[in-house]
Image (cartoon, rainbow, N blue to C red):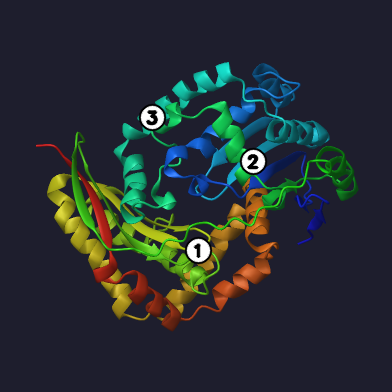
Amino acid sequence: MEYNFLELKNGIRIIHKPIKSEVAHCGFIIKTGSRDENIKENGITHFIEHAIFKGTKKRKAYHILNRIDNVGGEINAFTTKEKTSIYASFTKEHFERALELLSDILFNSTYPIEELTKEKDVIIDEINSYLDSPYEQIYDDFEDLVFKDHPLGMNILGTADSVKSINRKKILNFIKENYQTNQIVFSVVGDISFKKIEKLCTKYLNEIPKKVNSKKRLPFNNYKPIQKEIKKDTYQTHTIIGNLAYGTYHKNKTGFILLNNILGGPAMNSRLNMGIREKHGLTYNIESSYTVFSDIGLFYIYLGTDQKHIEKSIKLVHRELKILRDKKMSSSQLQKAKQQIIGQITLSEENNCNVMLGMGKSMLLYNKIDSLKETFNKIKAITPEELQDIANEIFDTKQLSSLTFKPTD
């Protein structure tokens, strides 16, 4: 696959994948997330993601929202624990319009005080909506349980009190300390000539002042397994079981991605879904997830079921984990699992917006993009012995933590 690359004099990197389509996608991916906050700043990265749409030196919020919408496009943004993404989708003839707007709101936002005041109420409503959903809240609370007193454990949205304390001065100081040009990638997927992209990126981005910061993130190294139950006003019992896992650069990362997909990935034939939901009908929703951070990872299994079934459901989960620890997969089983995840990755390439965001993330982390062939070769090289070793490390019963939301009596 052909990729085009450019690095501007200020360190901003440009990556482009040409495709044949009338629709194009572009966005800024920034290596700043809630992990870069301290406790007093909690929620400020997410707040900034909202606030950049509220006015620039030459636009009011109304004009920002209409600039892409008026040509049938879409503009959006999201924050994770380690990055922020601001992006747009549009018909390809409007690439300059999208680039100019995105660069304007990222680098020229004025953060009007009256708009910040209104946005605090919006974000507090967002926080409250999560608190109304135990399925969503338990994930955040589990991360807080595992990463206690560490930035990785803080909620991306912040708390009502921390959001209320955010002001324009704090925003500007945080941006100055954390938004560095050498940690920004502009990613493009579309039927646009790279000559045009190079010309327009030079026009709109080359004069952005260079800012370089080698600040290192606080590592997490004091994990202790913990089990906790909380009574909630819910109908179901919700449980998460998990452990620390591998970070971005660990040699076992690809192997564990495959193992997690076998255990409880999105396919209906995952072991957890087949062994617990389909065979016993105990839970409507059961899944496993693997979140990869730069230096560490987090694995978790979620299930929701009636309180009278929770003990049996958890017992069955541990049975599936024990099978993966004790029994090496056969060559035919492993081959089917590899074919499945290769197919899933191939299908995901149909979503060009996600491809664009993934390219930007890859450039931030590795300063390169693996081809599908390279990715598939890594998957094909995984052995049954490797998967069993990984299972014995990550699924070690003594290292598992759990959090349960139980209905009030």
Q: Amino acid at mark 3?
A: Ala
Q: Residue at x 69, y 23 (%)?
A: 64
- Identify the residue at horizontal 61%, vertical 59% (top origin): 346
Q: Is residue 353 left or right of residue 281?
A: right
Label 3 packing within 10 angstroms: few (<14), some (14-19), many (20+): some
Please indicate whether residue 176 sits to the left or right of residue 20 in the image: left
Tell me the amino acid under the disc marked 2: Lys
Disc 3, disc 2: CB below 8 Å?
A: no
Residue at the spot of label 1: 295
For the residue pair 268 and 58, the one nearer the viewer reads as 58
Q: First in sequence, mark 1 or 3: give its number.
A: 3
Residue 125 in sight in this render: yes
Q: Where does label 3 land, which residue?
A: 160
Label 1 or label 2, whichever lies nearer to me, is: 2
Q: Is residue 188 left or right of residue 46?
A: right
Closer to viewer: mark 3 or mark 2: 2
Identify residue for label 2. 176
Q: Is residue 205 above or below residue 132?
A: below
Per the image, label 2 sits on a secondary structure element best described as helix
Residue 209 locus on image (x, y percent): 78, 42
Q: Earlier in the sequence, mark 1 or mark 2?
A: 2
Residue type at mark 1 is Asp
Q: Residues within 10 Å of mark 2 (few under 14, many from 20)?
A: few
